[in-house]
Image (spheres, rainbow, N blue to C red):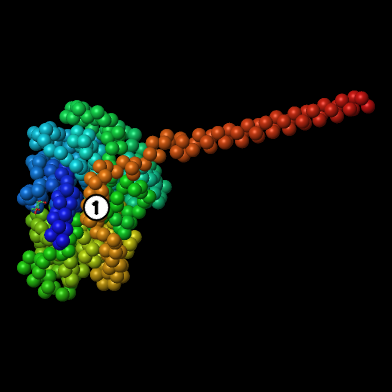
Amino acid sequence: MKLILLILGLILNISSCAEILCIYVLPVYSHMSVYNAVTMELLSRGHKITLISVDPRENERNNENVTLVDVSFIKAKYEDEMEKFLINPSDLLKNNPFLEIIIELFETNEFKNLLKIDKKFDLLLMQVFGFSPFNALAEHFNVPVVSITATDALSIEHENKGNVMNPVAHPDLLLEFPIARTFLERLQSITFWMTYKFVMMPALVKICDDVIDKYLPDTKNRDYYDLVKNVDLLLINAHPVMGFIRPILPNTIPLGFLHIYPPQPLPGILQEILDKNTNGVIFVSFGTVYKPNCFPNVVQKLLTACENLPYLFLFKYDGVLDDVPKNMIIQKWFPQSDLLAHNNIKLFITQGGQQSMEESILRRVPMLIMPISSDQRANAIRVEDRQIAKVLDIHKNDKINSDDIKNSILDLVNNKRYKTNIKSLAKLVEDVPMTSRDKAVWWIEYVIRNRGAKHFHYEQKDIPFYQYHYYDVIAFIGAVIMLIILFLIVFLRCIGKCFKSLTAYKLKIQ
Ligand SMILES: *[C@@H]1O[C@H](CO)[C@@H](O)[C@H](O)[C@H]1NC(C)=O
């Protein structure tokens, strides 16, 4: 009996193995960690993956169940441009490395060969960032498609799925505030959204359409918005506990904390250093996209602030520094997620990248956030609201000095409030029926099993604007009310006149 069950189980397991085509094209280390977590989880369930990636990880390269389409040579070309773009994404059309990488990818032989591949796929899993001609691959391979983002989705993606898109309540990811509270913020958010939607999007769509025309001419569904409509599910990596709360439809699955695993042991020396410094260790990192040597003033102030504090500082710094304080260790790289799990870590000084903040929360380490780019600033405000962190806008505000940094560090380390709050927040993240990785894979398999999820399509999204906001009905009712009023006025005037002429007539007779 057991044997039969085992064999049955094996058969069922084999039949539920799918061939999945994954496309990860934006070379941002922390984003790739998120996609990698999903890939690994899919592999662990026995699925086979064909992966197009500009930055494949070791565990993706050396896996017998991964067919890798390696386009990592594209990545190096755009590294500097990427840094500039992410610090100030002012123009999405000019010098936008994301756009350039996507277009360049279509021209590679690796990609052209993929189009000719003789393989039956079950699903396209595709990273999106506002637009993507890769949508057309779903039709080319005749498969359902799931989009995934490493952060919250851009406003345009929310709107494409039919989620509430209001620039006051939900400013775009690229803006610096999570809610447009002041008049100026509202003005900025609304102009940004209008420009994005009515100026940039048509231009981006034109670019996508041209790419599809050129490289996938057999696509029937060539209109970009039709392709977008074709996306079955959108997985967004934004957790409500971090303040990402908005009305979303069943076609959008919120995840978050996707890339974090139970902590691994630290390398020997690091473990020793951390164990020894019982007075407290503070980890400093500005992430992987920006080199801290772009911010010499900030680094100088930071060093001055750290110098006289009774803690050990570990600074992830990709460069050479003079005058490193005695209580600071500088290294190009630290195993951040594992390091933050050590008991003696008191504080994390970070630029506020979403993945870093997620790690800090699950490891229960309060943060001092010095945001660099716009979404980091908005994220920082979100978690500051949760009272688990403090924000110092030092990259933008020259007036912030080393004393401000020092005082913030002291407050964050000594005031128990931050630690208590972050502990309860972490518990909320963990208090779920299944982990985000399980949830992501469950939904991906759901789309595979059911050959799509078009039944979640929000048809009402296509109701014309004036009908959706019932302007036509309001106009009609308004018109009827006006007519009635007009009629009454005419009627009363008439009666008045009749009455007058009647009295005049009566007077005449008398
Ligand atoms: C590849 O897939 C097969 C069949 O599902 C499985 O037995 C094997 O362990 C997988 N290999 C790796 C490295 O995951």
Please provide percent x and percent y for residue 482.
61, 34
Q: Image quadrant for the N terminus? A: bottom left
Q: Which residue is drawn at 41% across and 36% down?
A: 463
Q: The residue tagged with tag 1: helix, strand or loop?
A: helix
Q: Nearer the viewer, residue 342 or 384?
A: 342
Lateral position of residue 505 relative to residue 290, left or right? right
Q: Can residue 326 be seen in this view?
A: no
Q: Is residue 194 visible?
A: yes
Q: Quadrant of residue 365?
A: bottom left
Q: Which of 154 and 413 is in front in this view?
A: 154
Lateral position of residue 483 relative to residue 372, left or right? right
Q: Which residue is drawn at 30% across and 34% down?
A: 225
Q: Quadrant of residue 455?
A: top left
Q: Which of 451 and 40 is in front in this view?
A: 451
Residue matched to label 1: 442
Q: Which residue is drawn at 29% across and 70% down?
A: 420
Q: Which of 12 and 405 is in front in this view?
A: 12
Q: Residue at x 25, y 48 (%)?
A: 446
Q: Is residue 6 above or below residue 111?
A: below
Lateral position of residue 399 relative to residue 279, left or right? right
Q: Image quadrant for the C terminus? A: top right
Please provide percent x and percent y for residue 328.
12, 65
Lateral position of residue 11 relative to residue 485, left or right? left
Please provide percent x and percent y for residue 327.
12, 68
Quick one: which residue is furthest to the front in this view?
A: 1
Please provide percent x and percent y for residue 64.
6, 49
Q: Is residue 409 above or below residue 31?
A: below
Is the distance from the Cβ of mark 1 to the nearest ligand 1 atom less than 8 Å?
A: no
Three-letter amino acid code of the residue under disc 1: Trp
Few, some or many residues within 10 Å of mark 1 (<14, 14–19, 20+): some
